[in-house]
Image: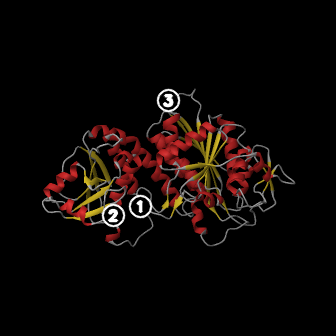
Amino acid sequence: MKIQINEPSLPKSGALLIGVIPDRKLLATGEQIDKLAQGALSRALQAGRFTGQKGQMIEVLAPAGTGLSRVLLYGLGKPEEIDPLTLENCGGDAVKRVLLSGEKDLAIACDPVPGGKVSLADAAARIAFGAKLGSYRFDKYRTKLKPDQQPSLVNVNVLVKGAPAARKLHQPLEKLADGIFFARDLVTEPANVIYPESLAKECKKLEKLGVRVEILGEKAMEKLGMNTLLMVGKGSVRESQLVVMQYHGAPKSSQPVIFAGKGVCFDTGGISIKPAGGMEEMKWDMGGAAAVIGAMHALAGRQAKVNAIGIVGLVENMPSGEAQRPGDVVKSMSGQTVEVINTDAEGRLVLADVIWYAHTKFKPRFIVDLATLTGAIIISLGAEYAGLFASDDKLADQLFAAGKAEGEKVWRLPLDDAYDKMLESHIADMANVTAERGAGSITAAQFIKRFTNNVPWAHLDIAGTAWTKKDKPTIPKGGVGWGVRLLNRLVADNFEGK
């Protein structure tokens, strides 16, 4: 699907979306079309409960005098409350409405909104960005789709006065969308297609964008002493991998930022095996790694002025005669020992070695890790917020602000010595889980913190946000690519050129 931003010109065919604000007030293009259609749009607005509230949409088919096959009337809400996310949803909703309709062409009028706070150029860029995000589909394995189940939409044209400025603002957003799509594809692929070795090869595609990609196999990790990671993958026939992606967009003297991701390509739970119901969804237990890979794709694609390193630990957690057992003790790269009480608490074991490797090798400004880590975070926050844990207040505030701006919301939870003591083991330096029922997400974060060695660090538990069963304007059912936008915004707002 081709998305363009052009100067305003009333289309003579196809579909057209026009904005409406409360009290059924049409914007400029709507007034023009209504005049041509001899009041058809006004009559349609008065005929139902549509008032112009945010996200409302009605459709007027083939209004006389226009040549258009359909006009979509879209509620933008109160002018002073229209923000970039509202405009992205407008683009996404428009595309989803006509994607399978038989229409080939969709125009979206981006008109000035009296009292609005978003510039016209930014508004058009965000509508185009939302249209791209809303177009995402994963039909790779669907071989029997009927013609009316296949997308018909070919062209989306956002119409705005001052199109060159809008196109300039859209360029980095287009690269961000590419990173999000890359992450969505990785999360959505089945585990027989995406496993540690094949996911490592997917990372190699970033080299075309100027990212240096290094892959460490099991022998290299054994030499480094990365035993907590390696033992998670011990029960699988697939070899575990560590992938290091380096992007240099700033001078060498600029300290890098590091993003670390949990990449459990399939999680059976190991010997502490999960229930069968829903286990097929455990292909997305590498959602943290996918977010890091997608973020590196976006940063390199838009040539961000930052030195960024993405590190992902890729394993499969499978039960077999060689798998680690509950009660085993393993020595991490840091030298600390862990008693593995539950083999289904494996993500923290992977991150323990990944994070230790990251800060000892690269001496970063900070580390942010992302992981589909605990079911407990879903109980706490559902699917609307990711859990945020941080050793550094400034970094936590920056992540909160970035998440709010991008619609990838986070909520900070506590870290405390009292929770840390719950990880005590009678025979090792620590246990990988606590014997108590409560604070499961917090104790998991406390475990990871033991391997940060006082480097500024934040942990995002994205178990509730990486995958969704709800179709949203810019997000499909399934893999969200959650975290790509947040990490990109974190860098853009705080660390580029610094």
Check disc 1 and give the amino acid type.
Answer: Arg
Circle 1 is placed at which residue position? 137
Residues marked 2 and 1 touching at CB (< 8 Å): yes
- Which quarter of the figure is the N terminus placed in? bottom left
Q: Image quadrant of residue 322?
A: bottom right
Circle 2 is placed at which residue position? 151
Q: Nearer the viewer, mark 1 or mark 3?
A: 3
Q: Image quadrant of residue 141?
A: bottom left
Badge 1 or badge 3: first in the primary sequence: 1
Q: Nearer the viewer, residue 291 or 406?
A: 406
Note whether 72 is above or below 353 in the view shown: below
Residues marked 1 and 3 touching at CB (< 8 Å): no
Badge 2 or badge 1: first in the primary sequence: 1
Note whether 455 is above or below 93 in the view shown: above
Left or right: 15 in relation to 411: left
Q: CA distance from mark 2 to mark 3?
A: 41 Å
Check disc 2 and give the amino acid type.
Answer: Pro
Q: Nearer the viewer, residue 89 or 101?
A: 89
Q: Position of residue 335 (x, y in %)?
A: 79, 44
Q: Secondary structure at mark 1?
A: loop
Circle 3 is placed at which residue position? 497
Check disc 3 and give the amino acid type.
Answer: Gly
Q: Secondary structure at mark 2?
A: loop
Left or right: 1 in relation to 337: left
